[in-house]
Amino acid sequence: MAGLRSALPAAPVSEAIADAAIPMATAEFAVDRSTMSAVPRSFPEASQLRKGAERMSRNHRITEWDPEDTAAWEAGNNRIARRNLLWIIACDHIAFGVWTLFPVMALFMPQDVYGFSAADKFLLGATATLVAACLRIPYSLGIATFGGRNWTVFSVLVLIVPTSGTIWLLAHPGLPLWPYLVCAALTGMGGANYAASMTNTNFFYPHRRKGFALGFNAGAGNLGVPMIQLVGLLVIAIAGHRQPYWVCGLYLVLLTVVAVGATHYMDNLEHATYDVSHLRSILREGDTWVLAMLYLGTFGSWIGFSFAFGQVLQINFVGTGQSHAQASLHAAEFAFVGPALGSVARIYGGRLADRIGGSRVTLAVLAAMGIITAFLVAISINDDRTPGLTTAATMVGYICGFMALFALAGLGNGSVYKMIPSVFEARSHRLGMPEADRSRWSQATSGAVIGFVAAFGALGGVGINLALRQSYLSTGTDTLAFWAFLAFYLSAAVVTWARYVRRPTSTAASVSDSQPHSEPARV
């Protein structure tokens, strides 16, 4: 302690201990507490006192954060960022599970008991997806306004309401559709968590690591979708298709656990900004709308198919002559695999985009998705024209085709998200701003675009569920929906090639009239 007093002659012992407890910050270190200053590396006592002081007091606020400062990053900021990333992923993972609650519960809801048709169940999924899309921008604003830790804890705890409500609804079959729609809408709050978590990760990580960090955040969080489907499979296999309460009960416990963890281990970034002025400015950007359209095709496909795949499989298994219970079990056996493939592929999509460029990866993904969808169109047409029960070969074709679409959509999710900070980081260098202002503009604009693109992309899930619903209502098959998906993928591939690959630049206008006109950004 004498060494500490000599190093800080003007500071009381209590202040010295507090100073020694925080991670390194400012120009060289990260300030992890609002009332504390940085700890110079020359203090050997700092490492000895850090753990004790951390236990004594943590207010979970970071007042200064510069992820581009390499020295500070290696000195300890990377550990702070990683801790926040891991806990927000855990929360996002469970929230995604709650968002997918009704597509899983649909396997536990036979029509002769609950009275809901396949079209009604697709509507439940579309409702949850629509609400998530509408709430993603407010959630991104919330995490910047109230702090990553505070908003994450709130957004997790509020999901207890629809999870508990689902238990009550399923225990009272025979109710009309509207209370189920209300509860499904509330589960959409779980999908809104995604945009908030991605915005928070964007603030914490340097540009050179964003592809990996955003991809890992999204991919690991997205694994919440196949995880709840796997839980549903286990419940069906162990307790039968009439015991959905086990699934909801488990997630009530998990919501509580991750909320407590986020309370203790996450931090708020005080200078993280994402406000309505940023949103207004990005809406004037052509790149914003192009990137949103691309994400509509990749993430929209992943979440839309995640919601619909189990139901599509169940319908087709029933078409082979199976009972509802058998079809539910067999659908659950495959339903979780596709979303899991897409979630893992997303991580590698971000890494691949870091290496060869997001636009090239995105173009290849969209072209391949078009080819696979054409394959599904051919299978579906053949099935429509073949009298009798659905054949085993047709089911194998459906399953393989969807698995490929899931994996490709996951790769595209990672590559498109890598394109967002790349586009606006490149453009910021052409605005003629001082370095500090340039960096803040790039971070704020990227964060705003990430929130908007996440919201817009979720609308793709709405479109997929509504397209399948209408296709089944009109023709009794999914062929018309597959034709619509094929047309979109090919159109998106052409736009990607024309705007970012053939001419690897974007042609958006300047961010605001007050800023100098910027050159197109190289992706």
Image: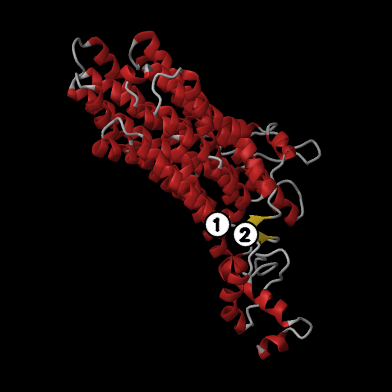
Please say if 28 is above or below 154: below
Give the position of the N terminus as an image quadrant: bottom right
Q: Residue furthest right?
A: 514
* Left or right placement of residue 330 versus residue 160 in this view: left
Q: Position of residue 129 (x, y in %)?
A: 50, 29
Q: Find the distance from the CA under tag 1 to the CA under tag 2.
A: 14 Å
Q: Quick check: can you spot residue 498? A: no
Chain-order first, disc 1 or disc 2: 2
Name the residue at 44% across, 42% down. 222
Please say if 3 is above or below 214: below
In this rendered view, identify the residue nearer to me: 175 or 285: 175
* Left or right placement of residue 242 versus residue 187 in this view: left
Q: Position of residue 477 (x, y in %)?
A: 33, 14
Asked if disc 1 and disc 2 are in contact, CB closer than 8 Å, the reply is no
Q: Quadrant of residue 171?
A: top left
Element assignment for label 1:
helix
Using a 10 Å C-alpha cutoff, classify the residue at mark 2 as few (fewer than 14 neighbours), some (14 to 19) or many (20 or more).
Answer: many
Element assignment for label 2:
loop
Which residue is identified by label 2? 67
Name the residue at 69% across, 44% down. 274
| Residue mark closest to the camera, 1 vs 2 | 1
Name the residue at 63% across, 48% down. 425
In this rendered view, identify the residue nearer to me: 29 or 307: 307
* Left or right placement of residue 166 versus residue 478 in this view: right
Please give the count of numbered marks on the rendered protein: 2
Q: Position of residue 93 (x, y in %)?
A: 46, 45
Name the residue at 67% across, 74% down. 18
Residue 84, numbered circle: 1
In this rendered view, identify the residue nearer to me: 274 or 493: 274
